[in-house]
Amino acid sequence: MTSSYKQAIVKDMRLASLEVLRKTARDVFEEKILGSNLKRKVIQNGKNNIIDNISDGNGEINDIQPNHNGDNADDDGGGIGLLKFAERDLITGRVLGRGAFCVVLECSYSTLTFDGSKISAQKEGSRWGNFGRQILRRRKRVNGTSSGSTSATYSSSTGSSNQDNQCRPTMRLSSNRPRYVMKHLSSDLKRLDKIKFLKGTVDLAMETRFLASFDHKNIICLKGVSSKDAFSDGYFIILEKLYETLGRRVKGWMDMDRQCKGITGVFTGSKKKARRLQSERILAACDLVAGMMYLHERNIVFRDLVRRRIRE
C-alpha cells in the first residue's frame, strides 16, 4: 500500500469522524440549547396564561354579587354585595382544622354600623366573649342612619349606586359559642411548595366564586371575604361554623338507638324516641338530597361529600 493511498484513507477517516462529530454536536445543540429554549418558551407561555387567568378570575371575584342575602334562614335571592374585611379587624381563635392547602380558625368581628354611605366598625375589645356575637346579619336598610366613632371602614362591593339596596350588618348577641370561621391558605405553603400554593390559591378563589352564587338553606353560606385581592397573599373567606357534623350526629343516633333497644327503653318511652329518631334521619337525608339536587341542577358535581362536611 503506497503512502499516498494511506494518506487518502486517513483523510477519509478524518472527514468521516468530523462529520460524525458535527452531527453529534448538532444533535446535542438542538437537544440542549434549542430544546431548553423551547421548554422555556412553553413555561413562559404557561406562566402568561396563568397570569391572564388570575387577572380575569380576580376581576370576577371582586365583582361578585351573591345570590343570597347573607342569612340562609330567610334567603330570598335578593343578594347584595359581599362585605370585605381586613384581617387586622378580626378576632381569631383556635384552629378547627387543617387541609391540604387551607387552615380553618374560629373568628368574630367588631361591632358594625352603617352611616349611609359606608359600613364602619369599632373594636369592642379582644375578650373571647365576642365570639358569641353574630356577624354579618344582614337586614334591609330602614330610613335614617346610624353614627358613632369608628376605627375601621369597609366598603360594600355593590358600590354607591345601589345604596337603597344596601343592608346594615349588625352584631347580635347569641350564645357564647363562635358562629363563624375564617378559612385561609396555610402560611407555610408558599415557602415550602409554590406549586401547591398556586393550586390552593386558585381553589380558594373558585370556592369563593361558587359559594357566592349559591342560594340554598342546605348549603353553607359565605358571609364575607378579605379586602385583599383573591389571588394575593393573605386572602381569606368567612363561613358559617359547622357546630355538629353529620358524623357526630350519626354517632348520637347510634347511641340513642341502643338506648331504645335496651331494657331501659321499656321504661323511658322507647317507641316514641324511636319514631323521633327515624324522623330525624329521614329529614337529614331529605336535606342532603335537596342540597345535592340544587348543585346538580347547576351542572355542579361535588366530589368531596363526606360526613364531616355535612352539618346538622
Image (spheres, rainbow, N blue to C red):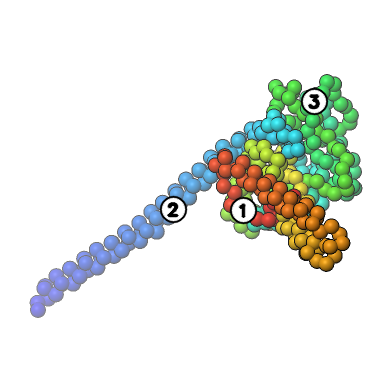
Q: Position of residue 98 (x, y in %)?
A: 70, 57
Disc 3, disc 2: CB below 8 Å?
no
Q: Secondary structure at mark 1?
A: loop
Q: Is residue 127 above or below residue 252?
A: above
Q: Residue 14's image quarter? A: bottom left
Q: Amino acid at mark 3?
A: Arg
Mark 1 vs mark 2: give the one in front: 1
Q: Position of residue 82 (x, y in %)?
A: 71, 35
Mark 1 vs mark 3: give the one in front: 1
Q: Residue 216's image quarter? A: top right
Q: Is residue 196 above or below residue 236?
A: below
Q: Amino acid at mark 2?
A: Lys
Mark 1 vs mark 2, CA separation in Å: 35 Å
At horizontal 84% and vertical 31% (from top left) the residue drawn is: 113
Q: Secondary structure at mark 2?
A: helix
Residue count near mark 2 (Cα–Cα under 10 Å), binned few <14, some 14–19, many ≥20: few
According to the picture, the residue beneath numbered tag 1 turns out to be 304
Using the rendered image of the protein, determine whether residue 81 is visible from the camera's viewpoint: no
Residue count near mark 3 (Cα–Cα under 10 Å), binned few <14, some 14–19, many ≥20: some
According to the picture, the residue beneath numbered tag 2 turns out to be 39
Q: Position of residue 160 (x, y in %)?
A: 72, 24
First in sequence, mark 1 or 2: give its number: 2
Mark 3 vs mark 2: give the one in front: 3
Residue count near mark 1 (Cα–Cα under 10 Å), binned few <14, some 14–19, many ≥20: few
Q: Is 62 situated left or right of 182 in this image?
A: left
First in sequence, mark 3 or 2: give its number: 2
According to the picture, the residue beneath numbered tag 3 turns out to be 141
Q: Nearer the viewer, residue 276 or 16?
A: 276
